[in-house]
């Protein structure tokens, strides 16, 4: 297995700032930067030492709603695909 890819500290800070301050979903940031979502969630959890801000809570709620809608859409598509068999 190859050497793990290191992310420059300033790039890491920029990614986390966009997620926390701008409210972009972790999935979007991960895709844009070619980083696994788990890596970003690890960065976020290692930096958790205080109560989340209202902005962070709103961002999480927005992302949660988006993910639930996506799961719902996928479930409906799978259901329709299985009925066609």
Image: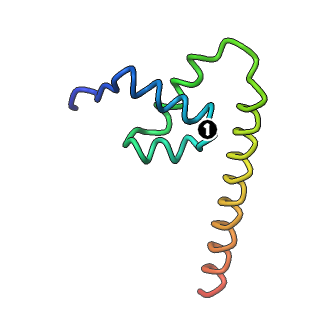
Residue at the farthest top position:
49
Residue at the farthest right position:
54
Q: Quadrant of residue 25?
A: top right
Q: Quadrant of residue 76?
A: bottom right
Query: Where is residue 56 shown, x and y percent of the image?
Result: 71, 31
Relative to residue 47, is residue 15 depicted above or below?
A: below
Residue marked by disc 1: 22
Query: Where is residue 40 shown, x and y percent of the image?
Result: 50, 31
Residue that appears at 49% across and 39% down: 37
Q: Is residue 7 left or right of residue 25?
A: left
Query: Where is residue 24 shown, x and y percent of the image?
Result: 59, 43
Residue that appears at 38% across and 20% down: 9
Residue that appears at 34% across and 26% down: 7
Q: Is residue 51 left or right of residue 71?
A: right
Residue sitting nearer the eye, 27 or 54? 54
Residue sitting nearer the eye, 7 or 18? 18
Relative to residue 80, is residue 50 depicted above or below?
A: above
Residue at the farthest left position:
2
Q: Is residue 25 left or right of residue 12?
A: right
Residue that appears at 71% across and 38% down: 60
Residue at the farthest front position:
22
Tell me the quadrant of the picture where the N terminus can be found: top left
Relative to residue 10, is residue 83 depicted above or below?
A: below
Check disc 1 and report its element: helix, strand or loop.
Answer: helix
The residue carrying pointer 1 sits among few (fewer than 14), some (14 to 19) or many (20 or more) residues within 10 Å by Cα, namely few
Q: Is residue 66 left or right of residue 6?
A: right
The colour mode here is rainbow
Query: Where is residue 6 shown, x and y percent of the image?
Result: 31, 25
Tell me the quadrant of the picture where the C terminus can be found: bottom right
Residue sitting nearer the eye, 28 or 2? 28
């Amino acid at each position: 297995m190859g050497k793990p890819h290191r992310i420059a500290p300033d790039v890491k800070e920029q990614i986390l700032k966009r997620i926390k301050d701008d409210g972009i979903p972790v999935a979007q940031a991960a895709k844009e930067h070619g980083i696994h979502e788990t890596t970003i969630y690890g960065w976020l959890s290692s930096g958790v030492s205080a109560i989340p801000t209202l902005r962070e809570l709103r961002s999480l709620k927005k992302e949660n709603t988006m993910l639930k809608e996506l799961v719902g859409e996928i479930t409906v598509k799978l259901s329709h695909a299985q009925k066609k068999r």
